[in-house]
Image (spheres, grey):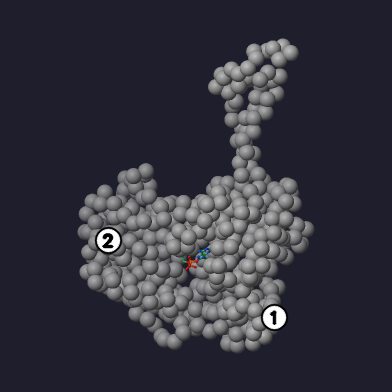
Amino acid sequence: MTLPGTGTLAGRAIAALGRCGATLPTIAGDAGPAPLTARTPIDGSVLAFLHPSTSADVEAAVTGAHDAFLAWRTVPAPKRGSVVRRLGELLCEHKSDLADLVTLEAGKIRSEALGEVQEMIDICEFATGLSRQLYGRTMGSERPGHRLSETWHPLGVVAVITAFNFPVAVWSWNTALALVCGDPVVWKPSETTPLTAMACDTLLRRATTETAAPDGLHHVLLGTAVIGEQLVDDPRVALVSATGSVRMGRAVAPRVAARFGRCLLELGGNNAAVVTASADLDLAVRGIVFAAAGTAGQRCTTLRRLIVHRSIVDDVTDRIAGAYRQLTVGNPFDDGVLVGPLISGAAYHAMHAALDTARADGGVVVTGGERVGSGESFYVTPAVVRMPEQTAIVRAETFAPILYVLAYDTFDEAIALHNGVPQGLSSAIFTTDHREAEGFLAADGSDCGIANVNIGTSGAEIGGAFGGEKETGGGRESGSDAWKSYMRRATNTVNYSGELPLAQGVEFGPRSPDDFA
Ligand code: NAD
């Protein structure tokens, strides 16, 4: 069996992987489990055949990570930060190689692939600084001569399960924070993006060696959901950070809960933007087109629903449809291409079926939805669909570039439509009216984890906490105080008084030490 695929794209992938220091393992004959086939959505060709991890590999990875934890948790946090600082430098050095792999495996256009790698570099900088800022609080004790405070300690092994569409950024959000917090990582990337994962793993291992960190801080396991399930059930895994579909979260969360483990869920979104009558439409249309058609509609934060004031809905729809018709769909490596391929034939069929359902519900496809080309790759023109109401298909996340447009009359109606879906990831309002903007951000406004004004739903910065509510799972990653998910908190009371007063004025037992005599 040949290991690498034989096409030009396979050559490009193997070259990028090689520059990152990773080599493809040898697959001996036909023995062992069926190989994992890495393909590119660009033309459907094979990039490489890989060894899928076995159950024994999972066991060894968790054991190795747990052993590493016992040493790593006692390393001072600022020293732990030096591994992440070095990782950030290596990511900078290999930015172009990693972006190549992201484009090859996930189909992102070059600029977005470079942006995803930049996000890794950014979070490494953030985490390096954070390694000196894992602050606990000191609270005033109600008892004299007592000090009440909290301390944050490393948590344990973190399993990171990631989706295909952010094959490296989500890993880095988790891993950079976990490492400075004192936690080793076992990573189960999407089965669709194994080469990108191998490259990152190799660079991180290099960073750990060069900074003399303990062995076993990072492991990557290649394979399907079965590998993820074994990680989910392992009691030595203190935190399962799982990114993917709501379906996956429904399977993972109860299993982790059954063993009282900790879960951080980043699941599907069904993001909307409200466009009010006062909106700056030039700005709004630009923001909407990037959020809805960028990454071929395959971001968790992709704009999927547009809720527009009835007085401007025709105008807004026409402008967006006009902009959509100018988007170039094609090979994501080519200059000028803004929309790359869908990840698979299944994604294309799901889009097709969703458009059929929308039509049956009275929707009108204003533009897009056609397949471009044929064969083993699946390119589509992004679709804009006018809907008479928010039907079941609009309330579901179809992971493809479909933008449903709905009209509203009152602001309260817009908010009700906006919040009337099971998911709660990202949201936006386009308005120049201060009251509408603040109303959208208020407690009875958007119910999402991310709420923006005059900017689209996608393209978050790493400085804020990232995640969503309701079926999106409630997890928070990346910036702000998301690090707290990767640590355990101990509340400490120190009595330096020589007396033993009880809290809340409780009295118990003898009133003086002489009473014990
Ligand atoms: P997916 O749910 O099919 O797979 C995600 C990962 O989970 C893969 O690694 C997969 O092997 C693993 N997995 C699946 N079932 C599992 C199980 N029972 N136990 C353990 N692991 C399991 O998702 P996908 O198609 O790769 O990605 C698209 C989805 O991910 C969309 O719904 C998108 O909105 C979501 N997503 C969410 C975020 C976020 O931050 N909220 C980010 C990226 C993607």
> Which residue has dot 2 on it?
390
Label 2: state its secondary structure: loop
Dividing the picture into quadrants, the one containing residue 409 is bottom left
Looking at the image, is mark 2 or mark 1 nearer the viewer?
1
Can residue 463 be seen from the camera position used here? no
| Left or right, 24 with reference to 347 | right
Which of the two discs, 2 and 1, labels the residue nearer the N terminus? 1
Total label count? 2
> Which residue has dot 1 on it?
26
Q: How would you rate the neighbour count of disc 1 (Cα within 10 Å): few for under 14, some for 14-19, many for 20 or more?
A: few
Percent x, y of residue 308: 28, 59
Percent x, y of residue 377: 46, 82
Farthest residue, direction front? 517
Q: How would you rate the neighbour count of disc 2 (Cα within 10 Å): few for under 14, some for 14-19, many for 20 or more?
A: some
User: Residue at the spot x=68%, y=18% of the render?
Assistant: 499
| Left or right, 460 with reference to 206 | left
